[in-house]
Amino acid sequence: MRIALLGAGRIGQVHAPNITAHPRTTLAAVVDPHDPSAHALADKHDAVVMSEAAAFADPSIDAVLIASSTNRHADQIEKAASAGKAIFCEKPVDLDVARVEAVADHLKAHPVPMMLGFNRRFDPNFAALKAQIDAGKIGKIEMVTILSRDPGPPPIEYIKVSGGLFRDMMIHDLDIARWIVDEEFPELSAQGAVHVDPEIGAAGDVDTAMVTMRSTSGVLVSISNSRRASYGYDQRVEVHGSKGMISIENIRESSVHLSTQDGIRLEKPMHFFLERYEAAYRAEWDAFVRLALDGETDLPSIEDGLESLRLADRAAQQA
Amino acid sequence: MRIALLGAGRIGQVHAPNITAHPRTTLAAVVDPHDPSAHALADKHDAVVMSEAAAFADPSIDAVLIASSTNRHADQIEKAASAGKAIFCEKPVDLDVARVEAVADHLKAHPVPMMLGFNRRFDPNFAALKAQIDAGKIGKIEMVTILSRDPGPPPIEYIKVSGGLFRDMMIHDLDIARWIVDEEFPELSAQGAVHVDPEIGAAGDVDTAMVTMRSTSGVLVSISNSRRASYGYDQRVEVHGSKGMISIENIRESSVHLSTQDGIRLEKPMHFFLERYEAAYRAEWDAFVRLALDGETDLPSIEDGLESLRLADRAAQQA
Amino acid sequence: MRIALLGAGRIGQVHAPNITAHPRTTLAAVVDPHDPSAHALADKHDAVVMSEAAAFADPSIDAVLIASSTNRHADQIEKAASAGKAIFCEKPVDLDVARVEAVADHLKAHPVPMMLGFNRRFDPNFAALKAQIDAGKIGKIEMVTILSRDPGPPPIEYIKVSGGLFRDMMIHDLDIARWIVDEEFPELSAQGAVHVDPEIGAAGDVDTAMVTMRSTSGVLVSISNSRRASYGYDQRVEVHGSKGMISIENIRESSVHLSTQDGIRLEKPMHFFLERYEAAYRAEWDAFVRLALDGETDLPSIEDGLESLRLADRAAQQA
Amino acid sequence: MRIALLGAGRIGQVHAPNITAHPRTTLAAVVDPHDPSAHALADKHDAVVMSEAAAFADPSIDAVLIASSTNRHADQIEKAASAGKAIFCEKPVDLDVARVEAVADHLKAHPVPMMLGFNRRFDPNFAALKAQIDAGKIGKIEMVTILSRDPGPPPIEYIKVSGGLFRDMMIHDLDIARWIVDEEFPELSAQGAVHVDPEIGAAGDVDTAMVTMRSTSGVLVSISNSRRASYGYDQRVEVHGSKGMISIENIRESSVHLSTQDGIRLEKPMHFFLERYEAAYRAEWDAFVRLALDGETDLPSIEDGLESLRLADRAAQQA
């Protein structure tokens, strides 16, 4: 499968080596309005630089990986679908629910394999948690607790265009909740606060938030988010069921334990999401290949993105 | 200090040895409408059996420990205060907010040292968590997560008179939230479900619940409760602040680790609250002695009981 | 069972409340050459002060607990046995193998229930480890690793009369090795060093030591000792078998975890052996009561003390 | 730097992608007597297949990575040194001390950058432990405990030519001990047993072993090895110093915790050494590049291999 990568920025640079290393895919083309970035990445992977239009028109391109800026995603998905390319798109599709609905409609009219980059589902720890739940290890799910904190806030300029904490950050946790519980959540309440940076508040956003949801069958979900955790990247999930509880803990920078008169010191969790989720990005790409070439199902779809965005919207209105 | 113990049931039997073992207190009298229980406990501790009226009238009795059934608490507090005794009372004062307010008024008119038995504050682990927060180890508090699950539900008869999950069980967590954050919570949302036993639902109660609260300064609190945890008594708290996070983990039955081809097996958390909180009951009694004899402050007061009951009421109405 | 306690020092004060609290034993008499200590302890427990001779002669005394200074143990055991008293004796019986052999012979001639205070076997964690091994959880034992470090060295005066690290400190670990493996150890090698205090070396002892042993069936045992561990009382055991590994970890002062930019800080292990082994001392006394009154077997005997002392002697000669 | 890889077997296949991925090295040639293996590996990395003689003679080859069978190592090192190539060689150089001494002499006469593949030193966890020790976090080293167990024994045919447990397996731990303590060990005692497979005993080897060593300054080291650990690959180190203790724990397959009525189940340690030490192999190659191109020192040398082999020989004679 020959791939055109749309977007040569940070996240594009994460995906490129996975495309190259995968035995069934080749990075054929890089598309980016910033020419030097496009050329640097293309050269590194023996790919060519193309314009977006050329990439969609080129019949030798089988699939596109959309890692451009968010405001380009919806358009690019529609054009790629019209061109019959398989599509892997970084989340979010768009920050506006109506626009995402339109894209979903377009995809119904132009059906191609399409997957959304909710990378956390593919982390080996999250995947192991889900597998054990599906195997019945904790019985019927009753409560889910999701704790998600970033090491520090992104630049205020990013926050202003990000859609806010709920649409940019908590959307990952909302997706995880829907994925684990496998139900929709008619009831939702949200609370937010500004503790990290008053500029975030001035921009109309919060930097600290809690959401509680109740699913159709009565599963209760609690999600906690903060834009800052001094101790590193904090990503934990705990699922309580009729027969037990299952949880995943953070991955520490090393397994060193230091015992002194000050106590026992363990290493912090890994600090940066690209490092923490390195294996997830590899597994995610492999899943997309299986979707496109083998027809694998149960992968994050545009409907998943749409539903999580709707929940984020409701939370943002309440908080 | 000579103590009259009102109530020779399970919780009275927990307190009696602590009264006896404390160097500054003596168990002088046991009061219980069930005569054989009163005599058995009194004999074991070289105390006498008295009627309630006699205990309040006896000038040699300095203080009462109220461990009777909940519906007797309010009356006994008022009588003890009128008689000038120092009062330790098991929670709750009463299930009705108006009645507790009346008791609080009575105590203002008859001021005596009075402490409520929120035992969890005195557990060495909770106390160490609070001390480190007060010492500034995590900076300013931003979020609190409280997870509290009982090994199994009490008998349905008990549930029917208990005031329900929020007033009987979550009230401990509400107290802990107020104690840690040291602010009131004007905003509260609650969700509940019946997962453990449909009879609990039939009795008008829930057995699974989540509450989110927002304090005056914007601290967010999440509380999760279940009447059942197959793996034992689950009592954890995690507090996230501007400079870090502090948490307490469960106490396991032993420190044994078993590593086999099935993984690494740690022991379950201690199963029963009397065993889990044995040290807390001792420390709680010591705190009351310091309150009565040394004037120590900052101990759980009737106002703490009242405010937690108001939060429980609001949660019960929403869930 | 009425008990005479020989020795009102630190360890006698640990045992006294357990004797009193046990439903089947009463502390009847306290014997100690230091009169004020004897009276203080006796008064606290409603016991009388007696001379040693009087205690052995008193037919109402059923058993003695020997917690006197080490150089008195052997004599007192022999006199108590001659007087037909059941005997609980703190380890060691004596520092001289020949003297212990003589005591063992005396006990054969004057058979009474007799138990040695190897308290560690009765710690709930060690007991749970042994129970799971006996239940076959790790298959056949192949290797044992014992790590034992004290928070700090005892006074140099104590070290000079203690018999040295191997006879005073490692003897506990040698007993644990024999108890777990349930075989003798014909092969032993030892190495020692002086790292903690040169005065200990000047006194002819070591403060740091490792012993390796091989049992008759080929089980390998490694024991590590240090007189100092800045992080508290370090007592761990790990047993590797044909089907898995089982270990016990230290007990921490509390379950608090503090996560900051410096890492995750857990509390130190409990610092002091009386606090760490509080439950062990209670369980140990209960075991002795079952030995004396119910004939329970498999408790630490004088032969166990003798064999561990022989191993300690061999190690001391090699190191 | 253009590399000739000698050996296209399992370990050669581990190194090849690291050579290719490193920005300063290229895999130029593959040498292997088994032609199909050589071609398969060469094709995958755009390298050519060469004879050993051609590789040494080719002036465009800057360095060789020796991953051939053990009995070829010594010869290949000498030829590569004579040809002026930088040399990375998998351990061991040879199983015979005299032969290794001869190779060391040859290298003195033909000085080239040369590094031995003691991969464990480059594992991020081992490296973090060493860095914290070097930074003085535990003060002066006093005791080291190394526990090393393989998931299962290699084929008996391999064991017969491996030099035995001490020269094949414990040599890694002996190197780690020398690396951490940074002293030689004049005193050593060893004990061994056959618990895993009687065929190993019939081949004159042991499958379970303990070694204790004492360094020139009195640091005590305990090493435990087993050819089998049902729970996975067990590799832990604990270093005790004057100011504290530092240890590294195993890396588990995932961070999942499952709490049920059977206890809390953590995942097993990673099972296979290539997976467990994936990062170590990458870091090791990077170190060699820095040695060859930048003159970095303090990397595992032939003298390190020689000294560890001498210790292994002494242990094998005693056990």
Image (cartoon, coloured by chain):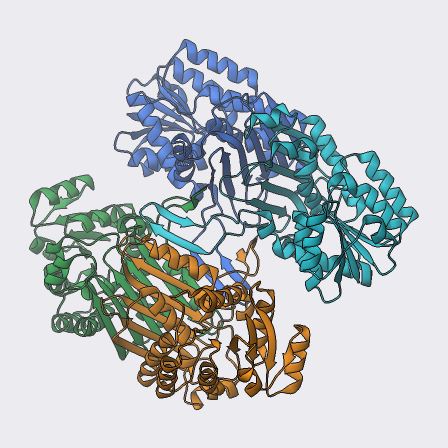
Chain colours: A blue, B cyan, C orange, D green
Residue D39 image point, x, y percent: 12, 42
Residue B158, image quadrant:
top right
Residue at 29%, 65% in the rendered image = D224
Please indicate whether residue B200 sits to the left or right of residue D191 in the image: right
State whether residue B204 is above or below residue B67: above
Query: Along the line of sight, which residue is nearer the eye, D65 or A283?
Result: A283
Please indicate whether residue A261 sits to the left or right of residue D54 in the image: right
Residue A167 image point, x, y percent: 57, 28
Q: Is residue B283 visible?
A: no
Residue at 38%, 59% in the rendered image = C130
State whether residue B69 is above or below residue D154: above
Residue D150 image point, x, y percent: 26, 55
Residue B130 image point, x, y percent: 67, 53
Query: Along the line of sight, which residue is nearer the eye, B192 or A148?
Result: B192
Residue C187, image quadrant:
bottom left
State whether residue A225 is above or below residue C14: above
Please indicate whether residue B114 sits to the left or right of residue D57 in the image: right
Q: Is residue A180 visible?
A: yes
Residue D239, image quadrant:
bottom left
Query: Along the line of sight, which residue is nearer the eye, A139 or D210?
Result: A139
